[in-house]
Image (cartoon, rainbow, N blue to C red):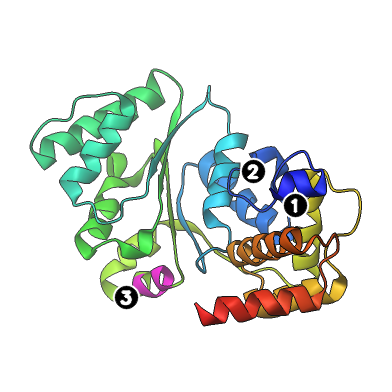
Amino acid sequence: MIRSFFGWERTPFTKEIEPRHFHRSDRFEQCVARLQYMVMTRSIGCVTGEIGSGKSTSIRALKERIDANKYRFLYLSDAHLKPRDFYRELLHQFGASPRFLRGEAKRQFQHLVWDLFENQKKVAVVVIDEAHLLSGDMLQEIRFLTNFNMDSVSPLALILVGQPELQATLQLRVFKPITQRMNVRFHLESLSSQETRAYIEHHLEVAGSTHPVFTTEAMDAIYAHTRGISREINNVCTASLLDAVLRKDKLIDAIHVSRILTEFDDQ
């Protein structure tokens, strides 16, 4: 509907956007650069950010940029897993049949990681999303997981991704052994007003737009409501575009956005 009305090649502001079309703000590039550093140095680290700030998008960008011939990418997003299920899921992603007992599954996973590192010359990259929801038992298991060969050599990179409360949790004394092992901790800030305008314009350009669609005042209103959170920007922009289609308007001004935000507030 939106694409055909505006005559674009694709619909903007959707999560199906290809990695090559991501909006690369300075903050986003800083985040991805740190993720790449963790991978290259086989480190443990964490990335935090508000809901919808672009953390998962950064992980997608990381996966796209690392060499599949050198790295094995393993991704977990079920933070409610217990330690045994945690190892079982990782082993499934390795294509291995997990052993039943947790200790056996853990040793099985460590053996596969070492074999990958020493014999196949590849590094396992383990990304745990929604890590702010991890239980204390799981965080302690991560501590033990990273203790390869008495900390002398690490054959894997381990990245925790979560909301800001993850940082607060890791500051607790009981988790100090984990934070001491962390080489990188990065918080992904939301977009500024200027970056929000650039973000909107970029997505429209990728869609195939050659003319302004949102006025400056409309984009400022979107920023004021979303506080620069990319997922919220996507939602408001999509709703505004749908409103414009129904009204057969090719230009979206602050009045359009105000009307949409009123509808959001009523939900």
- Element under label 1? helix
Residue at point 63% right, 74% down?
Answer: 226
Badge 1 amino acid: His
Residue 165, horizontal then vertical, whole percent:
41, 73
Q: Nearer the viewer, mark 1 or mark 3?
A: 1
Residue at point 19% right, 60% down?
Answer: 137
Q: Nearer the viewer, mark 2 or mark 3?
A: 2
Residue 5, horizontal then vertical, whole percent:
78, 48
Nearest to N terminus: mark 1 or mark 3: 3
Question: What's the CA distance linking mark 2 and mark 3?
Answer: 38 Å
Nearest to N terminus: mark 1 or mark 2: 2
Q: Do labels 1 and 2 touch, CB within 8 Å?
A: yes
- Magenta highlight range: 165-169
In the image, 246 versus 98, the foreground residue is 246
Badge 3 amino acid: Leu
- Element under label 2? loop
The label shown at residue 172 is 3
Badge 2 amino acid: Ile
Q: Is residue 175 above or below residue 94?
A: below
